[in-house]
Image (spheres, rainbow, N blue to C red):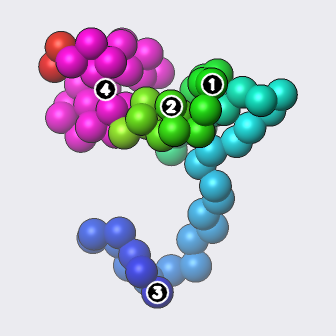
Amino acid sequence: MIVRENESAKGWFRSERFIVSDRNWFYITREGSQVGPFNSKKDAENDLYWYIHCAQKGKFYGNGAMARELCRTRHW
């Protein structure tokens, strides 16, 4: 079983992070927030990349809206 760094091998349930509804794409954060809509899955994946990047850099505030906006404009 492949596990994350510093995570023991347990039977964690994992689900798809990306969902589509009425041709709009969304992603779900670990915190349970649904983020979107995006025009394509690629756009949602790109936004999630920057969301995670900012969270790892310690620029994660509240529900992540500020972090996402900072990352989109590359102001970290």
In which image quadrant can residue 68 be found? Answer: top left
Classify 14 as above or below 53: below
Which comes sooner in the sequence, label 1 or label 4? 1
Residue 1's label in the rendered image is 3
Q: Amino acid at mark 2?
A: Asp
What residue sits right under mark 1 in the picture? 39
User: Could you tell whether 12 is left or right of 61 in the image?
Assistant: right
Q: Nearer the viewer, mark 2 or mark 3?
A: 2
Which one is earlier in the sequence, the residue at label 3 or at label 4? 3
Residue 43 tag number: 2
Q: Are marks 2 and 1 in contact (CB under 8 Å)?
A: yes
Report the front residue among 19 and 62.
Answer: 19
Q: Residue at x 28, y 21 (%)?
A: 71
The range drawn in magenta is 50-74
Left or right side of 49 for 29:
right
Dot 4, how many residues are within 10 Å of its Cα: few (below 14), some (14-19), or many (20+)? some
